[in-house]
Image: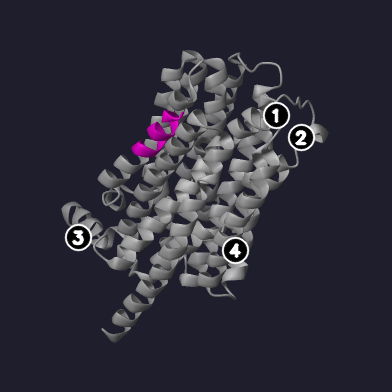
Amino acid sequence: MPAIRIKLSLIATYITFAILLNSVGTVILQSINSFGVSESSAAVLEGFKDISIAVVSFLVASFLPRFGYRKSMIVGLSLVMLACLAMPIANSFFATKMMFMCVGIAFALVKVSVYSSIGLIAKDRYEHAGFMNVLEGMFMVGVLGGYWVFGFFIGDGSDSGSGWLDVYWVLAGLCALNIVLLASTPMDERGSRAESAGIADDFRKMLRLVALPMVLVFVLSAFLYVLIEQGIGTWLPNFNNKVLNLPSDMSVQATSIFAASLAVGRLSAGAVLRKINWYPVLNICVLAMAALVILTLPLTEGLEGQTVSNWLEAPIAAFIFPMIGLFMAPIYPAINSVILSTLPTAKHSSMTGLIVIFSALGGTTGSLITGRVFEAFDGQTAFYLSIFPMAVILGCLYVFRRSVDRYSAEMAAA
């Protein structure tokens, strides 16, 4: 099996979806400006994406080993390519909602396929954890590049126009290239299919996993993490525009600092977690996130009426606050790696389905809550509220560690 080529195709596919999935914040801003919708109305875009991910993952996660991981990724990319081609032609908020629904459906197929494919090519749990960190790090590199690609097409003089929709011609072409790469990359998936006793049985196994205390605490932790990440990441462009008074293109480009911080944090997390236990590292990360919120957001007060036309005039908070991604970065891939490494290999596909479902639900909840608070109060209040789920995550991590240790001891005894 050409493992290197498979890894490259998985990374390329993941990067494509990184650009599309994390463009929600940018598209919310542009939908408000171009289509005249309110903040709360625009916030539903996250729901169209994430609810689609959750529903499709729930329905098809156990079926994908039989259908084929490579075929699933090709189908997902093809669907998104068509949706991207429709965006500049339809030029409407309804088309935008449908596009994100297609992206959600496709990502459900892609993420389960990508995560499950890692088990086919990884030689041991260390290679599995290492490649997962690289994969999630490259995902954030895609997010980073996406902000600049969208910023280029938005420009600084077309906030209320539709010229920014031309970006979707480029994204459709990127999908086409990935389809060609996957179609020409052979993958031996016989191992995954041999483990499947039947579709109905696999579906029941996925549901039974939730009954494990370890898995229950994990899905709550993943839900809360994604709630925070998507709440901040989705609304940061709007925060930069409405609170820090940056122009639309700079608002989007400044958000790339957040993506860059996540990329650096995840790419370096693998090396750190190979030497230091994950539990103290993640506790330090959560505490640092809360400290950054408390110390940085006061710097955003009293900026009303200020005009920003270049980077030298931008408030310092525009550069400091997005650095929260550096501390946020290790949490998600670390807890994913812990749960997958603890469970038997035969349960990885079902567990991946649960990861995708609860991550999607967390993303939708975070975006909707942040959007509502942003509209009812202000951006500062919306981001201050992220401290509460951070506190809950600290408790979840403690219970999660104890549950993992207990489950490992029981398996070793058995």
When asked about the image quadrant of residue 314, the answer is top right
Outermost bottom residue = 413
Q: Which residue is mark 2?
A: 314
User: How far apart are labels 2 and 1 at the CA level?
Assistant: 7 Å
- Residue 345 vertical placement versus 143 (above, below): below
**Could you tell me which secondary element the residue under label 1 belongs to?**
loop
User: How far apart are labels 1 and 3 at the CA level?
Assistant: 56 Å
User: How far apart are labels 2 and 3 at the CA level?
Assistant: 58 Å
Q: Which residue is mark 3?
A: 197
Q: Which residue is mark 1?
A: 246
Q: Point out which mark residue 269 bears.
A: 4
Outermost front residue = 302
Q: Position of residue 198 (x, y in %)?
A: 18, 56
User: How far apart are labels 4 and 3 at the CA level?
Assistant: 36 Å
- Residue 120 vertical placement versus 82 (above, below): below
Residue stretch rendered in magenta on the structure: 43-52
- Which of the colour schemes (rainbow, by chain, secondary structure, one colour) is used? one colour
User: Local crowd at mark 4 within 10 Å, few (<14), some, or many (≥20)?
Assistant: many
Mark before the other along the chain sequence, 1 or 3: 3
